[in-house]
Amino acid sequence: MTKTHQLSKTSLYKVWLGIKGRCLTATNRKYPDYGGRGISICKDWRDDFVKFYNWSIDNGYKKGLTIERKDVNGDYCPENCCLIPLNEQNDNKRNSLYVEINGKTISLIKLAKKHNIDSCFLYYRLTHGMNLEDAISKPKIRPKIIINYCGHALSLKKWSELSGIKDSTLSKRYKKGLPLEDVFRKRNGETYIMGALL
């Protein structure tokens, strides 16, 4: 009689099958990014789910954690794997961007989180000529738009407060070069003029 491990309904069993599929099955849709690049799974884990399961449990596996390869080009094996929160896995991909700061290499995503900056905004700054120090330290400043209307020069934000028209709407209209009467036109067709409607 064959003895089974009775763990085939666990989440780790699904993880193990997924790893084997990506690394060993040429018809798996993810094979080109794993097995097709020479990434495999060590013999102990490949041939014995219980060894994979025990390693995972011994290393603190719980819901919300994922198996991560330290070297994205290396195999799935105890020496190259660790457990990390799922939301951190994006930091360790082949297409992850890294920068060097104070002699240390860090992913752009981690650097952005550390400095409370949106990672896309940081990437934009770096790819548009800003040096790393300025990109993480300079505040995000939107140019202040001043509109001269009805004899008053006020900021877009102030005009928005006075008129009740969203500042984003005023900004779009103003940047399109619309006549000021149209910039300040309300949905009902009336035009705002300093506290009065025409």
Image (tube, rainbow, N blue to C red):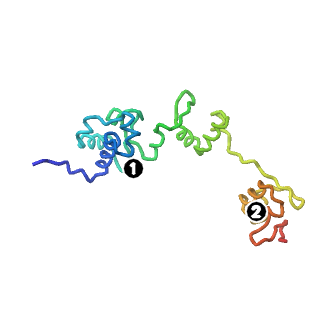
Q: Are marks 1 and 2 in contact (CB under 8 Å)?
A: no
- Give me the C-alpha separation between circle 1 and circle 2: 45 Å
Where does the image place residue 105, in percent across and percent down from the top left? 52, 31
Residue found at x 33% / y 32%:
79
Where does the image place residue 181, in percent across and percent down from the top left? 83, 64
- Asked if residue 152 is positioned above or below residue 42 in the image, the reply reads below
Quadrant of residue 85 within the rendered picture: top left
| Mark 2: amino acid | Glu
Quadrant of residue 183 within the rendered picture: bottom right
Query: Is 188 left, or right, of 194 in this rendering?
Result: left
| Mark 1: amino acid | Gly
Q: Quadrant of the C terminus?
A: bottom right
Where does the image place residue 114, in percent across and percent down from the top left? 55, 41
Mark 1 highlights which residue?
64
Task: Identify the secondary structure beneath mark 1.
Answer: loop
- Asked if residue 102 is positioned above or below residue 137 in the image, the reply reads above
Residue found at x 67% / y 37%:
128
Res. 161 mark: 2
Q: Name which of mark 1 and mark 2 comes first in the sequence.
A: 1
Residue found at x 80% / y 71%:
190
Residue found at x 28% / y 48%:
13
| Total numbered labels placed on residues in the image | 2
Where does the image place residue 135, in percent across and percent down from the top left? 64, 37
- How many C-alpha atoms fall within 10 Å of the one at disc 1: few (<14), some, or many (≥20)? few
